[in-house]
Every structure is written in structure tokens, then in C-alpha cells.
Image (tube, grey):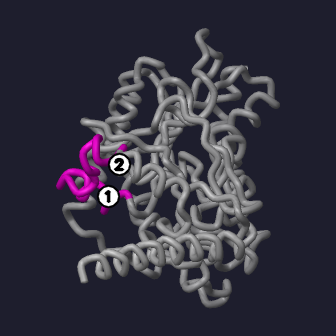
């Protein structure tokens, strides 16, 4: 009886392994066999998480692939120049600043640097963005790299930053211990198992793109953000103002110019009356920051030509969401137009 029970257990084990491999094969066959999930973060005692330095990692499914490349000090992009450029810009913020959804070349930082160089400016734009960062973490990361002495600091404010502040300060963003986080089995599953990633993301078909369209409306149906007042949770807004003020203060101490841009997912909701507007939450914070005297980068009017067709701006890799290089270029162009007076003063 004991031998028979052991035999049955072995059969069940091998059957389970076979089913797992069959499901993995089926998912890959349906969406393209290549798969690698992002494994670009590491635990940081101060920030909870930070970018893994010296990373050269392809991410994606089938034909949809992106390259994530980090330099030796953990910034997305090439090595920091040893000489001081004519103009050094810090891009700070979360996953949108990082450029989630596109290759290194498609990020706002790289595209902004290219625009500046085309105009004859010896510029370097450093990308300090990290996915999931709050205003608090953004400030702390800026502080860590302040020795690189930027001339301009651009904080790309995202709609979830206020909530992320509270989550970070409560310790809710702190991952498992470094040993657990870097467990070899977890690394293999996280990076290379489409089935594992699908289950953990609660989305069986990873090839199904992030659904931005649930709240899509035609421009005629969009209510102007001014008429949809946003009511912030008091503690969230207080933390957001406090740490944004800290960013502005540090920027001033370094003798740099400070700008705030606003970015988010639901693009079609921003278009109304043949004009691109802030979302209601971003509109609220833009007004508050403007009253404090901060330079506000307006929403990209270039978005107008995509009205009703913003799907084409989605990230290259289905499960990563966010924007592709074309989408990020809209914000890069808006940033460039806003900082142009400073740039013109350099020439």
C-alpha cells in the first residue's frame, strides 16, 4: 500500500509539472515565445527600492520587446559625463519619468536631450525616475544625486504620487528582505515564467494590453477639469506639498531652475473643446503649485491630433502599460517649450 501511494504521488507530481509546462507553452505560443519580465529594482534601505545598477535587460513578449539599460550608478541611460556639460537637467519622478513602456531611446529624458542638442546646446539630461516612487522618494533620490549639480530640475508629477507618499511613509512600499527578494527561484519565475507573471498580476493573458479605454470618452462628453473639482485627502495633499517644497528648496540651494510637469494614463479624458487639459487631480495640484510660484509645464497640446486614437501611444510591451516613444515625445516637447527661455539664455 505504501509503495502504491508513493507511486500515485509521483504520478500526480509529474502530471502537475506537465500541466504547468503545457500552460506555459500555450501562453507563449499564443503571444510569441520570447518572454522576460522586468527585474530592474533592488532593495534600498533608505528608499525601499531603487534601480539595479549595471543592468542590460530585455523585456517583453514575442515581437514586443524593450531594452532596460542602467548605468553604473543606477540611472537609466548612459554613464554620467565626467566633464560638466553646458546644461545639465534632472528628470525626477516615477515610472513615467523612468520611461516605463519604451526603450531607453524613447524616454522623455533621452528625447529632451536630443532636442536640445539639435539646437546646438551641449546638454545632458539625467533620468532619476524609478517606478512606483512617491514625491517623498523622488525628493530623497534627488538629494542623493545632488552632487551632480543640475541647472534645471523637472519633476514629472503623476496622479498617484499623493497616495504613494502615505504608503511609503507607512512602510507599505518596503519589499521583502533582500535575501527573499533575490531568491534564485523567485528571480527565475519573475523574469522568465509567463504563467507565474500572469497569475501574480491576476491577468491570465499577459498579451492583453492595459485597458485605458474603460473610461474613454469623446471630446464632446469630456467635462472640463475646472468643473470636476478634486477633493484631496488632507494628509495626502499635505505630504505632497511638503515634499514638493523640499524639492524646490533643494533646487534653489543648488542654483537651479525648478519646473513641474503632469502626466497620467487616461489621455482621451484630457481632450475637450479642442484643447488638452489637466485631469481634475492634476488641475488641483497645478493650481496649488502655481500659487506657490513654481513653474508649471502645460499639458501637451500635441495630444490633440490623437483624439479618439490614443491607443497608438500605448507602451510597446503589452503588460508594461504606459507610453511608447511617440507618447513620451509629446511630454518631452512640452518640457522643451517651457524651458526654452532658460536655454536661449545659455546660447
Q: Quadrant of residue 294?
A: top left
Please report the residue visible at 53 percent of the width from the left and 79 percent of the height from the top: 204
Q: Compared with residue 263, is residue 99 higher up or lower down, i.e. above or below? A: above
Can you name the residue that lies furthest to the top here?
Answer: 83
Q: Quadrant of the C terminus?
A: top right
Please report the residue visible at 71 percent of the width from the left and 51 percent of the height from the top: 329
Q: Could you classify mark 2 by the number of other residues whose Cα lies within 10 Å: few (under 14), some (14-19), or many (20 or more)? A: many
* Magenta residues (range): 161-182
167 falls in the magenta region? yes
160 falls in the magenta region? no
Q: What number is the disc on residue 7? A: none
Q: Compared with residue 252, is residue 180 higher up or lower down, i.e. above or below? A: below
Please tell me which residue lies in front, 157 or 20.
20
Instruction: Kindly indicate whether the residue at mark 2 contacts the one at mark 1 (C-beta within 8 angstroms).
Output: yes
Q: Could you classify mark 1 by the number of other residues whose Cα lies within 10 Å: few (under 14), some (14-19), or many (20 or more)? A: many
Please tell me which residue lies in front, 346 or 118.
118
Q: Which residue is the site of mark 1?
A: 164
Q: Which residue is the site of mark 2?
A: 135
Disc 1, SS: helix
Amino acid at each position: 500500500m505504501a509503495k502504491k501511494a508513493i507511486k500515485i504521488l509521483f504520478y500526480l507530481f509529474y502530471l502537475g509539472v506537465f500541466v504547468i509546462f503545457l500552460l506555459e507553452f500555450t501562453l507563449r505560443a499564443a503571444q510569441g515565445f520570447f518572454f522576460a519580465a522586468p527585474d530592474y529594482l533592488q532593495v534600498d534601505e533608505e528608499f525601499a527600492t531603487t534601480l539595479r545598477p549595471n543592468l542590460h535587460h530585455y523585456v517583453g513578449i514575442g515581437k514586443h520587446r524593450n531594452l532596460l539599460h542602467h548605468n553604473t550608478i543606477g540611472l537609466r541611460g548612459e554613464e554620467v559625463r565626467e566633464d560638466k556639460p553646458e546644461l545639465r537637467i534632472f528628470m525626477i519622478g516615477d515610472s513615467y519619468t523612468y520611461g516605463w513602456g519604451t526603450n531607453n531611446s524613447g524616454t522623455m529624458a533621452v528625447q529632451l536631450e536630443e532636442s536640445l542638442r539639435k539646437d546646438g546646446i551641449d546638454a545632458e539630461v539625467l533620468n532619476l525616475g524609478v517606478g512606483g516612487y512617491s514625491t517623498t522618494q523622488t525628493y530623497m533620490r534627488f538629494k542623493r544625486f545632488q552632487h551632480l549639480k543640475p541647472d534645471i530640475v523637472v519633476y514629472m508629477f503623476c496622479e498617484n504620487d499623493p497616495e504613494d507618499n502615505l504608503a511609503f511613509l507607512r512602510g507599505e512600499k518596503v519589499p521583502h528582505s533582500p535575501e527573499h527578494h533575490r531568491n534564485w527561484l523567485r528571480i527565475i519565475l519573475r523574469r522568465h515564467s509567463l504563467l507565474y507573471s500572469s497569475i501574480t498580476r491576476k491577468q491570465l493573458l499577459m498579451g492583453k494590453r492595459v485597458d485605458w479605454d474603460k473610461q474613454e470618452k469623446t471630446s464632446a462628453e469630456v467635462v472640463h477639469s475646472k468643473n470636476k473639482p478634486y477633493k484631496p485627502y488632507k494628509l495626502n495633499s499635505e505630504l505632497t506639498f511638503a515634499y514638493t517644497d523640499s524639492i524646490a528648496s533643494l533646487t534653489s540651494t543648488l542654483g537651479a531652475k525648478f519646473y513641474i510637469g503632469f502626466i497620467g494614463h487616461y489621455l482621451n479624458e484630457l481632450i475637450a473643446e479642442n484643447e488638452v487639459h489637466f485631469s481634475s487631480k492634476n488641475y488641483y495640484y497645478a493650481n496649488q503649485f502655481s500659487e506657490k510660484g513654481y513653474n508649471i509645464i502645460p499639458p501637451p497640446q500635441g495630444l490633440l491630433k490623437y483624439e479618439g486614437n490614443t491607443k497608438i501611444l500605448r507602451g510597446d510591451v503589452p503588460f508594461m502599460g504606459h507610453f511608447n516613444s511617440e507618447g513620451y515625445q509629446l511630454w518631452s516637447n512640452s518640457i522643451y517649450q517651457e524651458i526654452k527661455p532658460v536655454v536661449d539664455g545659455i546660447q
